[in-house]
Image: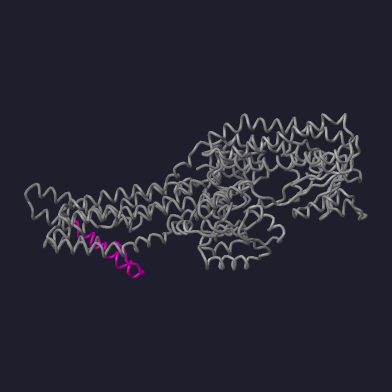
Amino acid sequence: MSLERILRWALVTVAVAGLATGIAARAAGRSDLADLCWTLATVPVIAGLVVSIVRDVLAGRFGVDAIALVSMSGALALGQPLAGAVVALMYSGGNVLEEIAVARAEHDLRSLVDRAPREAHRRIGDRIEEIPISDVAVGDQLLVRAGEVVPVDGVVTSTAATIDESALTGEPIPVVKVRGAAVFSGSVNGGEAFELAVSAAAGESTYAGIIRLVTAAQTAKAPFVRLADRYALVFLPVTLVLATIAWLISGDLIRSLAVLVAATPCPLILAAPVAFIAGVAQAARRGILVKGGGPLEALARAHTVLFDKTGTLTVGGARLLSIEVAPGENADEVLMLGASLEQASHHVVARAIVEAGAERALRLKVPGEVRESMGSGLQGVIDGRRVAAGSRDMIFPCGHVSEWASRAVRRASWRSALTVFVAVEGRPIGALLLADELRADTPRAIRMMREAGVARMVMVTGDRAAAAQAIGAALDLDAVLADRVPSDKVDAVRSEQRLNPTIMVGDGINDAPALASADVGIALGARGASASSEAADVVILADRLDRVGEAIVIARRARRIAVESIVAGMGLSTLAMLGAMLGWLMPVPAAIVQEVIDVAVILNALRALTPAYGQAARHMTAATGRELHRNHVSLIANLDRLRSIVDTLDDATPQNGAALIAEANRLVQEQVVAHERDDEGNVYPQLAGILKESHGLSAMSRAHREILHLARLLARVVEDLPTEKIDRYLIRDAQRIIEAIETLVRMHTAQEEDIYEAVSAHTTA
């Protein structure tokens, strides 16, 4: 316990003892002894207050403590030691109440520190020994038992491990880590015991970094607390004027003393720090570590937000955008062969292709005789066929590119995408288009920040202008600054700062200078020890952009509660002062009334610990959200086939055209129509009970009706095919209907994903 805390508790103990002893002496008829006890209870509090005021004045602050000093000193000078003792108890007790309230508010932050492991189980041969966590070294083999907190960062060496990362990321669903996967300290072993190869010592591990951030959050002082002192610049003169008026109209200095006692400014002293630390704790529950009340108050004032692009607005890696196929080929076959071959490569693009194949539930084959050409691609044998996947130069070595391949390259350039061609036995069969893409939660996060009051949003990125402009247009950002190196990002932040309070959101080392320069730097998805998290004022532990919007909402609510508490406390104190001025309250009752006001102010400030009303509304379970997402993944595969049919119809013969149109109709009726009817009949009724307003669902249902209308038109075309002359005009009409269905369903599905993301259990507070 710190010396300041010991003195705080000692003063309140003296005040309680002196007040109680004095009351006992008065009851025993010893008025002189009672006055002495009350005086002795008041003097130490006055002395401590003088020291505090002198310290504040030397630091350039003049605050509300002066009123308490005047009231206690005046009480002793005017022969009212009982009133002085009551004020002393009220003031010292208020400080203790603040400490208790802050401790309550910091519970969630302290729990992170308290759960840090102290020991580890190190394997040496066939023996397991218990060692202090400080003795763990890189390369050690540790055993993590069921239910234990992972002590340090490492890599799974067992077959698999089930890890609960909720304490780090806020995500409630445990994840399975296979052999070789990284595990972060602070997560919990949610399954059987597993072995871990240490990759970082305890002091350098994720959890140690988080604890450093927590310590900063506990000790930092909010600038807004000084705003309470600025309120005192008005409150103190008003108090002295009312005390003077009380003396002038009554001629009784005791009445003036009662005014001073009623004005003891604990609401100003307590409200701001309690509300802001409570807000910091509420943010910590959502996986948002705020380094104290200062950044939280700055968040509440934010006008402009600057975003990095890669890894912040986007997923930060290659993702499959589309599959372009040669005439007569199948998109699933192209992806299956490409993903099967890419299993043999450790390249980041190869990993993205394999993940795309797994997401579509394709059965990948084991490639043989694989040969990789660095920078070009791979070749291997799958099911006895020689398959190649790589660049255009590798697949088309002679330079002649077919028309469908040229179209694929053109479409890739429009979307700033990378193209991986796939060939079988030297014959190109398709191309995989990959690019960085928006996070699923980015549109919702942008909308949340707009609703929270952020007026200007700017993307600042080192990426090329074309790619950056595409993302900026999709999100309707106010400005896009591309081709920026780290120093340019700092300049952009400072330029915005000159106009308005500015937030910078980033995730990489190159963002650290800009994060440090901004009024509030927010590190997204950082694991507590990176350069970006050290430079930032706020660290979002979960890799989710929408947590930034939540942080702003929490900050604004905490600031609003702090202001409400200050204003309400000053208002109630003013009413008490007016009552004392009119002679309705004597010094002791005035002190008791003021104590009641203090407690009310603290309780109100603690509201910042709780979510805002309506945040804890009904929501869709995370499992339901994942199932709906899987259904959409399956639907997207069918949409890709529809797009391929539209392209193939360009050069189709009448007979082939009729077959393709019939295939498209079968996909639409069996997959698209069935999916939309299920949404309308089963999913949307669930959403109606969750969403506060039904207007959005009405618009989504309108899209269902349009999709079903287009499906009926396509079915009519297929019905008439046997009796119609299949010419280029009929084929073109069918193309338009199929293309309209594909485009509308794709956009409609993206909108539904946004809704599901918003109402899934893991996104609610």
Q: Is residue 147 left or right of residue 387?
A: left
Tell me what residue is drawn at x 25 percent, y 50 percent: 595
Q: Is residue 400 left or right of residue 220?
A: right
Boundaries of the magenta span = 41-67
Q: Main secondary structure of the magenta part?
A: helix
Q: Is residue 129 visible?
A: no
Q: Quadrant of the N terminus?
A: bottom left
Magenta residue check for 554: no
Image quarter of residue 398: bottom right
Q: Is residue 393 left or right of residue 359?
A: right
Residue 211 image offset from top left, x and y in percent: 50, 53
Examine the rendered structure and indicate whether residue 259 appears above or below residue 23. Answer: below
Residue 391 image offset from top left, x and y in percent: 83, 53
**In front of the other: 529 or 122:** 529
Residue 392 image offset from top left, x and y in percent: 85, 53
Q: Is residue 524 visible?
A: yes
**In front of the other: 636 or 369:** 636
Residue 452 image offset from top left, x and y in percent: 51, 52
Image quarter of residue 220: bottom left
